[in-house]
Amino acid sequence: MSPNQTSIADTPPKVQPTTYKHELVWKKIFFFAYAHLAGLVGIYFLTQMSWKTWIWSIFLILLSSHGTAVGAHRLWAHRTYKAKLPLELLLVLDQTLTFQKDVYDWVRDHRLHHKHSDTDYDPHNATRGFFYSHIGWLMCKKSPQVIQKGKEIDLSDLLENRVVMFQRKYYWYVAPFIAFVIPATVPWYFWNECFIISWHVCSMLRFVLTLHGTCLVNSAAHIWGTKPYDRNIRPVETMFVAHFSFGEGFHNYHHTFPWDYKAAELGNYYGNLNTAFIDLMARIGWAYDLKWASPDMVIKRALRTGDGSWHKSNIWGWGDKDMDEEDVKMVQENWKAIAK
């Protein structure tokens, strides 16, 4: 079947609605409500803070992205590469800065998500709607189904990791200090920024932005976009999420090749600064044994199970405005020849 043909298999199977009624966790609801209100105040202060605070805030956002995507996601959840101790320490510190649970809990939920993606066993099941998969699941107690399946996830590699288990042991003692107190105190202490401004911008607004950067991968990247690699799954490719999360929006690719350290096909760093960081760490010897899907493997998979958008979009490589129809046809024939 060609990529442009459709079949019953093209549509993800319908999932029966769960009979479990989720129980709200009000302390989390109040925390998220305060964080978002404080984040709005932070937006108001953006024009009043010093340029040093601007740079500090952007730096914190980049660190947070590395903690979630490069550390918890690509290193510990999927083991797409290996890291030496200095990089592990840096990434676990950055991940603590995000205030998105400790690495052990984060990885358990993410591995469960991949094993039972978009079913009632998925902690942030996208079939329950945008809000639930985005942030609603964080405000509810986990269902008995999710808890039971979570206990079946193999986490033996994390149990043997001293860095991960050290963070888990002391997480709730140090996380609030690292995630909120230090980000607000540095501008106030070192360049006399108003503490009210630094608190609302560097701590609360930064937390809200990085939180939604992660949440969009669970929600929007499972709803709106193309499926160049596997049309039979829900995850999609979306450049908006890729930019907002520094490289985690190429989600159809990621769910097709979850062991690829790039989490994308792209040969450059456009929309994927997280991959650039891993490559930098590899150059200095802190990251090694990087895994990736070969171009031949990607081409064959895209032609076999993709939705046909792989060769049409500027984002994924071809479809350049300077290419005429003959150029495009020649490229397509070359792909088919390679895939045979």
Image (cartoon, rainbow, N blue to C red):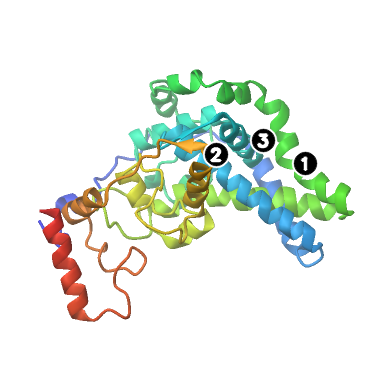
Q: Earlier in the sequence, mark 3 or mark 1?
A: 3
**How far apart are labels 2 and 1 at the CA level?**
25 Å
Whether residue 36 is visible here, answered yes or no, is no
Quarter of the image for residue 316 reads: bottom left
**How far apart are labels 3 and 2 at the CA level?**
11 Å
Q: Are marks 3 and 1 in contact (CB under 8 Å)?
A: no
Whether residue 184 is visible here, answered yes or no, is yes
Quarter of the image for residue 239 reads: bottom left
Q: Earlier in the sequence, mark 2 or mark 1?
A: 2
Q: Earlier in the sequence, mark 3 or mark 2?
A: 3
Q: Residue at x 71, y 47 (%)?
A: 34
**Judging from the image, what secondary structure is the residue with disc 1 in?**
helix
Circle 3 crowding by C-alpha within 10 Å: few under 14, some 14–19, many from 20: few
Residue type at the position of mark 1: Ile
Position of residue 201 measured from the top left corner of the image (x, y, whole percent): 74, 54
The residue singled out by tag 2 in the image is: 138
Position of residue 78 measured from the top left corner of the image (x, y, whole percent): 41, 35
**Judging from the image, what secondary structure is the residue with disc 3 in?**
helix
The relative height of residue 44 versus residue 25 in the rendered view (above or below) is below
The residue singled out by tag 1 in the image is: 182
Horizontal relation, residue 112 to residue 138: left or right: left
The residue singled out by tag 3 in the image is: 27
Q: Residue at x 20, y 68 (%)?
A: 331
Nearest the viewer among 168 and 138 is 168
Horizontal relation, residue 155 to residue 293: left or right: right
**How far apart are labels 3 and 1 at the CA level?**
23 Å
Circle 1 crowding by C-alpha within 10 Å: few under 14, some 14–19, many from 20: some
Q: Give the label, 3 or 1, closer to the camera.
A: 1
Quarter of the image for residue 122 reads: top left
Residue type at the position of mark 3: Lys
